[in-house]
Image: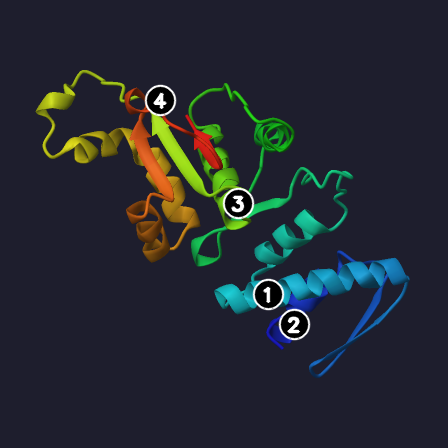
Amino acid sequence: MVIYGVNDAKLEFIRTFFPKLKIIARGDTLKVVGDGNEINRFEESLDAFIQYFKRYGSLTQDNISDILDSSGDQTRSPSGDRSVGDILVYGNNGLIVKARTPGQNQLVESCAKNDMVFAIGPAGTGKTYTAVALAVRALRSREVRKIILTRPAVEAGENLGFLPGDLKEKLDPYLQPLYDALYDMIPPDKLRQYLDTNIIQIAPLAFMRGRTLDNAFVIL
């Protein structure tokens, strides 16, 4: 069984997360002895491992750790808000996207509770990446019908009018951080389809005046 790993190495690693359970492997069968609640938690985790492997064709110890961290001892509020540490998106090539710093955790929690959130912080702290992950999650779960990504086209010494190409090609370099995040989280063919059908829209801030934003996740 692939989840066991070579010489049961992965299974031994999993056992460290369930010290109250006795986990016995016999062929493709697992026998688990212990507290009922712990057994339920183990069954949920095992199902998550299997689904992850079916989707990505691999399951590393890092993947196991991330899945257990997101589903193990975390609590959920009565309103259904996701708790800190939950996986936001399963990206391409087995990538797991989740909040990894206190600031990113705060952004995730604030988005769960508010219609509008302002994230302020130094460059490189994951504001855009985390926001894109939240948007992709909302689209996949059908909480929204479209994602609108917009940035001011801030010139850094160059002049937009002298850049080659049409308006989209002139603006693409300024929007590259958004594209980079999307390419991490959505398969290329699916992303191209979303862009072609305007389910995901990328536009400069100056073109947003008067837009209707119903059923949309908007990142500025």
Which corner quadrant holds the C terminus?
A: top left
Q: Secondary structure at mark 4?
A: loop
- Residues at marks 4 and 1, CA–CA distance in whole angstroms: 43 Å
**Mark 4 residue type:** Gly
Q: Residue under circle 1?
A: 51
The correct choice, above or below, for 15 with respect to 7 in the image is above
**Of the numbered discs in the image, which one, if any, rests on residue 141?**
none
Q: Residue at x 52, y 20 (%)?
A: 118
Q: Which residue is mark 4?
A: 210
| Drawn side of residue 9 relative to residue 58, left or right | right
Label 3 close to label 4 by CB (< 8 Å): no
Pointer 2: what residue? Answer: 4
Amino acid found under the numbered disc labelled 3: Arg
User: How many angstroms separate mark 2 from mark 4 (CA)?
Assistant: 56 Å
Q: Is residue 172 above or below residue 199?
A: above
Say what secondary structure mark 2 lies in: loop
**Mark 3 vs mark 2: in front:** 3
| Pointer 3 residue | 137
Instruction: Name the amino acid, label 1.
Output: Gln
Q: Secondary structure at mark 3?
A: helix
Quadrant housing residue 52: bottom right
Answer few, some or many: residues within 10 Å of disc 2's Cα (few below 14, many 20 plus, some between 14 and 19).
some
For the N terminus, give its image quadrant: bottom right
Q: Between 216 and 158, which is closer to the camera in this rendering?
A: 216
Mark 2 and mark 4 lie on one chain; the one further toward the N terminus is: 2
Mark whose residue sits in front, 2 or 4 = 4
Q: Nearer the viewer, mark 1 or mark 2?
A: 1
Q: Quadrant of residue 100?
A: top right
